[in-house]
Image: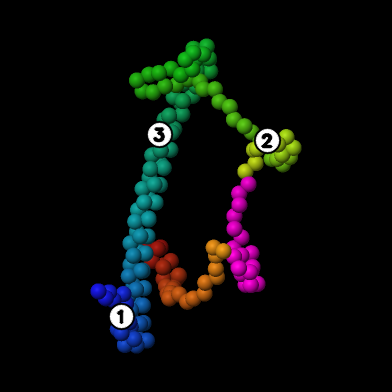
Amino acid sequence: MTTRINDNRAALAMTAEDADRVFQKLAEVTLAATSAAAHYDNRVANIKAEAALFREEYMKILKPFERQLEDYITAHPERFAKPRMRQTEFGKYGLRSVTNLEITDETAVMISVKAQGIQAVIVTEKLDKKALEKAISDGRQITGCEIRTGVIVKYDIKKELLDRIKKG
């Protein structure tokens, strides 16, 4: 069974003006899609801005309650010795012990752990594409990579048109 993948006879019959019209339609559809996306992006931005205002208002209401609860907890730490958190039907509040590592001098830490043989340094390997390209161009054979050369079919719609559409 023969399967036709591509037939370029119609393209061969096209004139430059035909291609211009196709490109114009492509550009017009792209501009329409960009316009629609910009419209929805603006709606989303407006909704997010409105939500931020509401969140800000609620935070103003919450702050005094947070301060009151903080004052209570810090005034009565003995009430949060065991258990550290007080459970309620709405959740829990109290004290929590926390610990974290703070690195104040990364270079000193590197020297210290290397000197002591502590495996605390992560080394990341990454291929240098420029070096690989140069090596292959210099005639070196490198398994697993090759330089490929070809042509691409492309188009560019004027940025000014896209920007104008985005702004509405």
Q: Secondary structure at mark 3?
A: helix
Q: Earlier in the sequence, mark 1 or mark 3?
A: 1
- Return the disc, 2 or 3, that comes first in the chain's sequence: 3
Left or right position of 47 against 84: left
Q: Name the kind of residue labelled 1 in the image.
A: Asp
Image colouring: rainbow
**On the image, numbered disc 3 is attached to which residue?**
58
> Could you say whether the residue bearing mark 2 is in a helix, strand or loop?
loop
Q: Is residue 76 visible?
A: no
Give amino acid for label 2: Ile
Distance Cα–Cα, label 1 vs label 2:
65 Å
Q: Which residues are magenta?
A: 123-142
Q: Nearer the viewer, residue 78 or 112?
A: 112
Q: Residue at x 63, y 72 (%)?
A: 139
Q: CA distance from mark 1 to mark 3?
A: 63 Å
Answer whether residue 69 is visible to the viewer in this image.
yes
Q: Secondary structure at mark 1?
A: loop
Q: Which residue: 45% across, 70% down?
A: 159
Residue 39 in picture, x, y percent from top left: 34, 59
Residue annotated with mark 1: 7
Position above or below: 16 against 104? below
Q: Which residue is mark 2?
A: 118
Quarter of the image for residue 6 reads bottom left
